[in-house]
Image (spheres, rainbow, N blue to C red):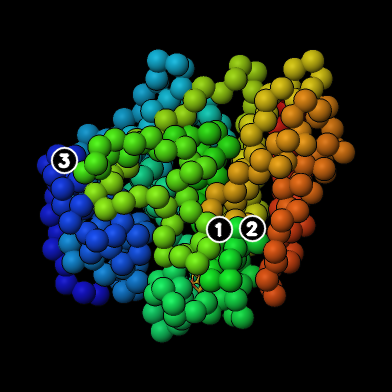
């Protein structure tokens, strides 16, 4: 692990000014922001991240969960995952988010990990975390060891010839199903970014994972109100019952009125290079009766673009079944 300078930011503007001195906000940034540290410190110990300077923002006043005027919710960037999962507003109105958070990591990690940090969680591709191996995401142009290597856990949607890494977060899948907006403050002012636009597909530049620029700091996330009568659910399938990343997961928000689906949002985890908003599935469900044929058609549509690798073709059927199960369960309760 390289030597680095650690300092604590006393204000948002101080943190922004410090991180703006980095030439990139992506892989290889010279300045990194620290909140819970559950991803960053791991990667620094592995020499995957080697910032010269680390800015601790954990004491900035960004740790509130508040109701917004429109009946939605505002979640501060440093709200801990454990606190968010147990917050009454989240448990009552955004069950899918609480469930996704509690399905992630371990209790100890959830006590430390923050909302902003989880949004920026890095892939668990084993070659990304091993500096002896080629990896286009860690070192652009070096190649991808996973395409002809161990790729059982990696992505089948949104991949490219340069990278097939799967996005690891559960929380972000739920935030995608809930239509979250990510609010950023930077040296060029404030921006609000829909979560669908926040993450980048790997394409030829897998080291660029988000639209963040140097100096950009995530300040909070907002969620719109869930329509009255809607229900939500997160289903996660994995190799073991706890402390494991998703092989496939589904976050669904559904409202049924007069025997028809009146509102639906669907996102998939474990299968995409980013939290996967399954718009094709939503189009198949919207306005239809909530029955098994509709759910099967929606799942087929969601996975129609899947491109399996040598070891992960099973994920296509696993994700289909995961989504059908989630839709069945959530509508049975309505
Ligand atoms: Fe690196 Fe992506 Fe290939 Fe994994 S899949 S080795 S992260 S380029």
Residue that appears at 47% across and 65% down: 206
Give the percent coordinates (x, y) of residue 97. 52, 37
Q: Residue at x 35, y 57 (%)?
A: 38
SS at mark 2 in the image: loop
Q: Which residue is mark 1?
A: 273
At mark 3, the secondary structure is: helix
Q: CA distance from mark 2 to mark 3?
A: 38 Å
The quadrant of the rendering that contains the N terminus is bottom left
The tag earlier along the polypeptide, 2 or 1, is 2
Task: Tell which circle, 3 or 1, labels the residue nearer the N-terminal end.
Answer: 3
Question: Can you tell which mark lies on residue 104?
Answer: none
Q: Residue furthest right?
A: 293
Q: Is residue 220 visible?
A: yes
Q: The residue tagged with tag 1: helix, strand or loop?
A: loop
Q: Are marks 2 and 3 in contact (CB under 8 Å)?
A: no
Q: Position of residue 309 (x, y in %)?
A: 68, 71
Q: Measure the C-alpha gap from mark 2 to mark 1.
A: 6 Å
User: Residue drawn 67% across and 25% down?
Assistant: 263
User: Cβ–Cβ below 8 Å for labels 2 and 1?
Assistant: yes
- Viewed as shown, does residue 217 lie left or right of 153? left
Q: Which residue is mark 2?
A: 157
Binning the other alpha carbons within 10 Å of mark 2 as few (below 14), some (14 to 19) or many (20 upward) gives: many
What residue is rendered at 20% in x and 52% in y?
20
* Residue 87 visible, this orientation: no
Whether residue 61 is situated above or below residue 24 in the rendered picture: above
Q: CA distance from mark 3 to mark 1?
A: 32 Å
Q: Which residue is mark 3?
A: 13
């Amino acid at each position: 692990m390289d030597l680095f300078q650690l300092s604590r930011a006393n204000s948002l503007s101080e943190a922004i000014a410090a991180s703006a001195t980095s030439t990139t906000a992506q892989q290889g940034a010279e300045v990194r922001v620290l909140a819970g540290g559950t991803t960053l410190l791991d990667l620094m110990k592995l020499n995957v991240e080697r910032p010269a300077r680390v800015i601790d923002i954990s004491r900035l006043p960004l740790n509130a969960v508040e109701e917004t005027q429109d009946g939605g919710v505002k979640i501060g960037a440093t709200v801990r995952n454990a606190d968010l999962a147990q917050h009454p507003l989240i448990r009552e109105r955004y069950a899918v988010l609480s469930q996704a958070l509690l399905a992630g990591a371990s209790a100890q990690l959830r006590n430390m990990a923050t909302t902003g940090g989880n949004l920026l969680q890095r892939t668990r591709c084993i070659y990304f975390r091993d500096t002896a191996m080629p990896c286009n995401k860690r070192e652009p142009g070096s190649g991808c060891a996973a395409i002809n290597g161990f790729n059982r856990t990696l992505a089948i949607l949104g991949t490219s010839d340069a990278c097939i890494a799967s996005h690891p977060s559960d929380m972000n899948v739920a935030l995608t199903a809930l239509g979250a907006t990510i609010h950023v403050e930077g040296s060029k002012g404030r921006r609000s970014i829909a979560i669908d636009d926040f993450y980048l597909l790997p394409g030829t530049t897998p080291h660029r994972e988000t639209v963040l620029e140097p100096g950009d700091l995530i300040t909070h996330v907002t969620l719109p109100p869930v329509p009255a009568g809607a229900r939500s659910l997160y289903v996660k399938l994995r190799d073991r019952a706890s402390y494991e990343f998703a092989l496939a997961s589904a976050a669904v928000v559904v409202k049924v009125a007069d025997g028809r689906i009146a509102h639906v949002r669907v996102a998939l985890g474990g299968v995409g290079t980013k939290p996967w908003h399954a718009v094709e599935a939503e189009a198949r469900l919207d306005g239809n009766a909530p029955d098994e044929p509709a759910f099967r058609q929606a799942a087929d549509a969601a996975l129609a673009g899947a491109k399996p690798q040598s070891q992960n073709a099973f994920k296509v059927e696993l994700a289909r079944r995961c989504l059908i199960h989630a839709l069945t369960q959530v509508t049975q309760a309505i």
